[in-house]
Amino acid sequence: MRKTVIGLMLIFITSFLVKEVNANEYLTYQEIEFEQNGAKLLESYSNGEYEKYYEKLTKKKFWGWRTYIRFENEEVSFLKDTLFVIINEGETPITETFSIKKEEYVKKQYSVTGTLGLDVKASDKGFKLGLEEKLKFSITKTVYTEIEEEFEMKVLVDSMTKLTVEVRGEGKVSNGIAKYYRFFKNVKKGGWEIFVVTTEYYSLKKELINEN
């Protein structure tokens, strides 16, 4: 008698198609790994690092931004979500069929700390007060290149095997700190971060089940 366990199977199709996301959705990803040692997300900055970087922006300005870029277009790989798991504890292989519909697009996400703000109401989300335009490097524009693809997939799950379906991807991260001045007075300061998702894809992983 075969025994099959299927979990979290019904939610993955709809969740993958949602394009309207919170500005910092990437902070909910299960894993984010940098290609370069030492690179980090804004949320990992220590208080000491903030103070160190603020000292690089001691020169005042009559009006506008002073910015410091700590990490620029650092490549990352990530595990966004685990969609479902199939475990075959029976004696014979089983075949599972599921449908996938996806859209591939470039998606830019933002995060801030301190007194910096996000314009989350606009259709083209971003930082308030034109901060992004003051950053002196090239970041991929927020343009959606929609490629709809729908297909069915059959997967053979061998006896005593666990199949995991995940959403993984690659992207680029840039972050640093900024100060905003009005009449030579620093009225806003904090950290900023831009996370550009360049690729998202489904990952199927098979593992043998330990009989012990």
Image (cartoon, rainbow, N blue to C red):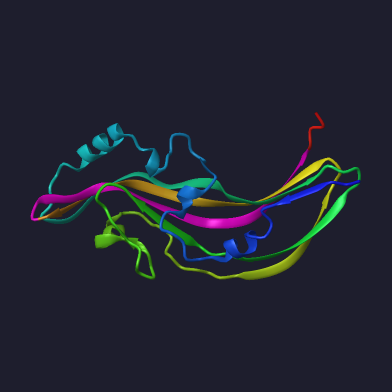
Residue 91, quarter of the rendered image: top right
Q: Quadrant of the C terminus?
A: top right
In the rendered structure, the answer to whether residue 203 lies left or right of residue 32 reads right
Query: Magenta-highlighted stretch: main secondary structure?
Result: strand
Q: Residue furthest left?
A: 183
Q: How many marks?
A: 0
Please name the residue shown 60% across and 70% down the image.
Answer: 147
State the image quarter where residue 41 is shown.
top left
Q: Position of residue 90 (x, y in %)?
A: 87, 43
The answer to whether 19 appears left or right of 166 in the picture is left
Residue 206 located within the stretch drawn in magenta: yes
**Who's the residue at 76% across and 65% down the image?**
152
Where does residue 175 sit, x and y in percent of width and height? 36, 47
- Most extreme residue toward the top is 212
Q: Is residue 190 magenta?
A: yes
Would you say 82 lies left or right of 174 here? Answer: right
Q: Residue 145: image x %, image y %?
A: 53, 69
Q: Residue at x 20, y 37 (%)?
A: 55
Q: Is 163 positioned to the left or the right of 2 in the image?
A: left
Q: Which of 11 and 176 is in front in this view?
A: 11
**Vertical comparison of 138 with 211: above or below:** below
Q: In this view, does 10 lie above or below 28?
A: below
Range covered by the magenta-colored residues: 183-208
Give the residue displayed 49% in from the left and 47% down from the top: 75
Q: Can residue 178 be seen in this view?
A: no
Q: Do we see residue 26 in this rendering?
A: yes
Q: Where is residue 53 in the image (x, y as percent from the top left)?
A: 26, 38
